[in-house]
Structures are given as structure tokens and as C-alpha cells.
Amino acid sequence: MAVRDIVLYPDERLKAECAPVEVFDEALAELARDLEDTRQVGPGAVGIAAPQIGVLQRVCIVDCSTTRKPTPNNGHLVLVNPEVLEWEGLVSGREGCLSIPDYTGNVVRAEKVRVRSQTVVGETFEIESEGFEARAIQHEIDHLDGILFLDRLVSRRTDLFRRKVYQKGGKKRPAESKKTG
Amino acid sequence: MSDKPDWKMLTLVGEDRPGIVSRVTNKLFEVGANLGEASMMRLGANFTIMMMVDYAGDGEQLQRLVAPVADDLGLRVHVDAVAAHLHRHVEPDCMITVYGADQAGIVARVTGALAEAGLNILELESDVGGTEKRPLYVMSIQGVASEGMEPLQAALDGLAELDVDVSLRPVETLRG
């Protein structure tokens, strides 16, 4: 159990394509624990990926179960060799990164994703995710491919498209848009 | 870059033409200045630059150094010594977009109501599109809702007679 140093940009390790995990041993379990310990220390981080602590393996964590504002989620996710099987919809949202302090920007992501992954003991599972959690999963999987949110920035000036905002149950938020008068 | 930055706010405005940014910033580079945060954009066929410049000399010296390039490009120059800092970003937690037929007072009415309801504006961009006969006004604001979203929504609801489309949305910044 250990909090590891966060790899900060610029560092070549953040641009590397990570290797698939093939051995599901105690070292992998320890990596997952270290990732989680390190995520907990990061200010408000909902995810972390192995390259952010300098390990170039396809492992990441996403946990949107304790966000300040509740959001639909699949609980605490340890994702080993995750892949997006299907996606739907595009939505813009603001992102930052533990590896890139003091900078945030708008990024377009899929609104919904279906993801196949393995657990730390090598069991395969699939989840469906939407909204904020789906964004977090895509942000972390990008890390495993050496892609940073800086690679996907879109202009704020042109970001006037209305975002889909889902409440629990998938209803459009009534207060989201109001025609006055 | 000097050890302790000495920031000036450099403002340049003039008729838009190609090459303004490269010529101005090359001059600044030549004289040993370092650039910080900046906003540069075309507004109404003018090109406008506001940028943080770290320069060891005083503002008048900086102005004199930039003047030849600015004159050549037809730009007006203004320099202010400012207390400025990098790495002091404030994250927005809400975004407001407004659009509608252009009319006098949209910005004043909307931002007045929002300010009273606790909005601190970090960034405002507005544009006028449409045609000369039927202009369309579009405004996008990012800010911090210091008293929460509800007072802001109530403030916007009170602007019914403006007859513009207004939307208020939370901005949840993902960190991962």
C-alpha cells in the first residue's frame, strides 16, 4: 500500500501506449491498490491510470460514486485491459488531469459507452456507463493509449451546443433550458 | 525569463490584417520579454490583443520597444504595470448562454441580474450574427455561482420580457 508520485506533463511516459496486462498476480493487485491510494490523495480525482504513476500497463481506476453532486455510476471500478465496445452521442464537458495541474479545458466525449474489461484477477465483465462516469472512463482509457485531454481540446468560443443533461432516470432536466417571455 | 516575473498588461488594437500576432510576439521575444496568459481575437474587423508580458524594464520602455512594429501595423498600444500571477486559475462551476434578436441592454440586464444573484464572471464572449436588418446576439458566460445555481436560475427567470433564449448549466470539471 503506497501513495506514488504523480507523473507530471511533460513526461514521455504520458505519451506511451501501455501494454496489455497478461499476468494477474499479486503485483497487479498491488498496482491497483497503489493507484487507488494515489487517486485518493489527488484533489477530487474521479480516476487515475497506471501511466500517471509511471507504470505502462493497461490498468486504471474510475470511481464516480462519491462526487459532490451525485451522478449515475457503476461504483468503484478497477479496469484492466478495458476497451470501449460501443458508444453513443457526443457531449462537451470540462476536464482536468492530475498530471496537468492548473489547467482545464473542454473536451468532446461519447455520452454513453459500453465497456468490456477484466478485473484484477482476470475475470471479464461488461458495463454500460453514461454522462460524467462515461467521460471519466474515456479520459482514463485515453491515458492507456498515451492520449491526454490536451490532445482533444475544443474551443470554448464555439462550444455553444446545448449539452444533453440527464437526470437519474434519463429525463431531460427541465431547468436546463428556458425560453423566457 | 527573470527569476521574479515583472508583469505588464499589454493591449494592442487595430484594423485586422495577416501577421499581427507573429510580428508583435517576435518583437517581444527579441527584446527578452516572456509571455503569459493572453486573449487575442478579431472583434468587428479589428484585431485585439491583451496579454501578460514579463519584461524587466518599466512600462514606458516596453511601449517604446513595441511602438515601431505597432505603428507599422497600424495598432494602438497600451501598457499597464499590473500585479499579475500565473497558476491562479479559478474554475468555473456554471455556464450561461444567451441568444436572441439583438436589442440594447441584453448584456446589462442579464449580467446585472446574475451579479445580484451571486455570479462571478470569469469569461464572457459575445458575438453578433444574423443580418444587418435582423441581427442575432449570442453570449456565452463562464463563471462561479457563489450562492449556488438556484438564485441564478431565479434571476434568469425574472428576465422574461427580454424575450431571449437563456440556458444555465452546471459545469462539473472532471479530474482524472
Image (cartoon, coloured by chain):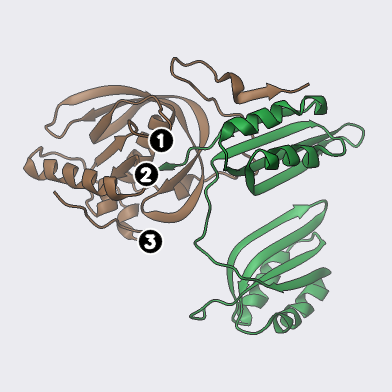
Q: Residue furthest right?
A: B133
**Front-most of residues B108 and B136:** B108
Quarter-of-image position of residue A117? top left
Chain B representation colour: green
Q: Residues within 10 Å of mark 2 (few under 14, many from 20)?
A: some
Residue pointed to by mark 3: A10
Residue B40 position within the rendered picture, expressed as x and y whole percent measured from the top left: 68, 58
- Dot 2 or dot 1: first in sequence order is 2
The brown-coloured chain is labelled: A
Residue denoted by label 1: A68
Front: mark 1 or 3: 1
Quadrant the C terminus of chain A occupies: top right
Provide residue B97's location: percent of width, then percent of height.
67, 35
Amino acid on which the number 1 mark rests in the picture: Arg
Q: Amino acid at mark 2?
A: Gly
Asked if the residue at tag 1 contacts the one at tag 2, i.e. Cβ–Cβ closer than 8 Å, the answer is yes
Residue A35 x/y as whole percent: 22, 46
Q: Secondary structure at mark 1?
A: loop
User: In front here: B113 or A177?
Assistant: B113
Mark number displayed over residue B129:
none
For label 2, the residue is: A44
Q: To which quarter of the image does residue B17 belong?
A: bottom right
